[in-house]
Amino acid sequence: MEILAQGKGELIQPPDLEAFREWNRTQKSRKLIDKLMTEQEAVSRFVYDGCYIGTELYGTVRCPMSLTREVIRQHKKDLRVCGQGVAELDLWLAAGLVKKLDITYIGLEVYGTSYALRRAVESGQVETCVEWSNGAISWRMKAAAMGVPFIPVRSMLGSDTFNYSAAKVVNDPFTGLPVCLLPALILDVGLIHVHRADRFGNAQIEGITGFAFEMARASKRLIISAEEIVPTEEIRKYPDRTIIPYYLVDAVVHAPFGSHPGEMAYLYERDDAVYREWIEASKTPAGAQAYLDKYVYGVKNHHEYLELIGAERLKQLVEQRERRET
Amino acid sequence: MSSQSYSKSELMICVAARLFQDGTTAFIGTGIPMLAAMLAMKTHAPNLVPVFEFGGTGAILEKLPRAVGEARTFHKAIIASGICDTMETAQRGFIDYGFLGGAQIDCYGNLNSTTIGDHDHPKARLPGSGGGNDVGSLCWRTVAIMQHDKRRFVPNVDFITTPGYLSGVGARERAGLPRGSGPVNVVSTLALMDYDSASFRMRLVATHPGVTVDDVIANTGFELIIPDRVGTNEPPSAAELRLLREEIDPERLYI
């Protein structure tokens, strides 16, 4: 196929499908192993300096925030990161952990542009920003989940988002039309927060699933944090809700309110006061550091973090949640 | 007509809301599009199907979502799926409208939300595409919602994050984008625009009450097509204002 155009962005994580199959054959046990561990152990064992890592869903919604904070506490550095993110990637950027970005969106939603992103990119602290759309990054994970080297899509075409990506345009050999090819994205580490999981890693999500299905299947190492740890019989009662089967998972962490200050569908509302505290603090490096000192370095683990937030506040967030119609 | 006073954003939301058609599907981004969709569903378009990129489709919007993934985007929805499903639904031609924003727009409706200045050494690093590029590529018709001034309505955007008509007639199809798709309207703080069918360049349709054609020209950094007849947008009605203030945004996050 003739290549009609190619983005000038670096392919930060070139996919190796044979190595991925070999990894899945030799490194991912099919045995039922108890993988329940602390966030300290999970991050220490599976996240490493320089790894290519992603989080799902994003900052204010079902986000693995307790794991995100632990990555900072352990100062895992030179991270190569994909995403779209709000508060989670903001924290990593402010803590100086990010070296390269496959960026789709990092911002503060209704509150606008991210101060931490601006500082990290404009100062050159982040070495590379390779551009993708939210659809594109999810489809790249889908290609990895399918076990194929690339996926053809009709997005990205004609834009500078394409020109600064690592995608290519070819003539479709069947119709002759130009089509955009996105390279498969195999992550070294994926972090996903779910509603419930068993000790082996079988995991279920309520509400929208974002790109959890694809990321779980595209990750070589997968850490699951869960609001609730349930017996496997509970999983087996509703297998249609299982998004992630145990053999994809390397670590299971029990993290009630693990998405805080983000929300968790049907369980608790987002904590806008703490979210706004970050936005205000992140306007200056000193403010961002003070926030990290208070909410990340100042507590030993997620349990202490929840004590800092306070039971009364957490109870309010539960009361304010969106409820299912009954 | 109401004699009540109203804010610029209230007017913009009302003008945008009137563009939604009942019984269509629409991709909704964060911010003003959410308020406009809610207002449309509470007035003339009760059967609008809002689609939010992370998987919520067909929600009953009772409380204003503040983000495209939160539980309010799939409240009493018909399906809660994921981003691949919603984007693929658009790619198959099922999404009629997409509502977008950006920091810059040019005469062909190309949008920038990535960088101001050179990409590799930016003066300002903005959030990036998010779902914008997909929405602008794959929905049948897109509507941009913009602050109207010369810094934003520019001759050339610094970075084409989201494709409009690119360099003009035929450019989308040459690039491989779906045939017959593209931008149809811009709702700004000053006026409503569409695109000339011969040149695909932006054209003034109607100014907001109290805004003159010269005001619009003075705040636009490229040559806007001015037709012989320019209308005036209806101000928000008392009913629209009541819905916005009491039901849609009682916390006044936007209005």
Image (cartoon, coloured by chain):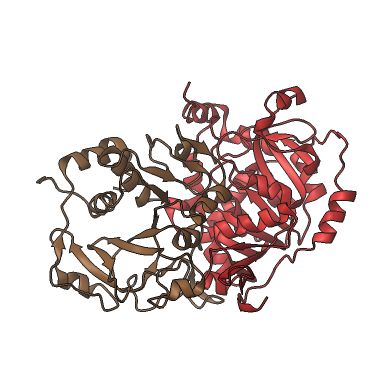
Chain colours: A red, B brown
Q: Residue at x 54, y 53 (%)?
A: B88
Q: Which residue is more in the foreground, B180 or B149?
A: B180
A219 in relation to B147, above or below: above
**Where in the figure is residue A302, as x and y percent of width and height?**
67, 38
> Residue B15 at x, y = what percent?
24, 53
Of residues B165 and B236, which is closer to you in this image? B165
Q: Say whether residue A194 is left or right of residue B55.
A: right
Q: Is residue A193 visible?
A: yes
Spot occupied by residue A141 in the image (x, y as percentages of width and height): 67, 55
The answer to whether residue B97 is above or below residue A325 is: below
Q: Is residue A217 above or below residue A119?
A: above
Left or right, B16 with respect to A150, comes to left
Q: Residue extending furthest front?
A: A174
Name the residue located 32 percent from the left edge and 71 percent from the top edge.
Answer: B153
Residue extending furthest top?
A326
Task: Report the number of numbered marks.
Answer: 0
Q: Position of residue B103 (x, y in %)?
A: 40, 66
Is residue A255 something one can see in this rendering?
A: no
Q: Quadrant of residue A32?
A: top right
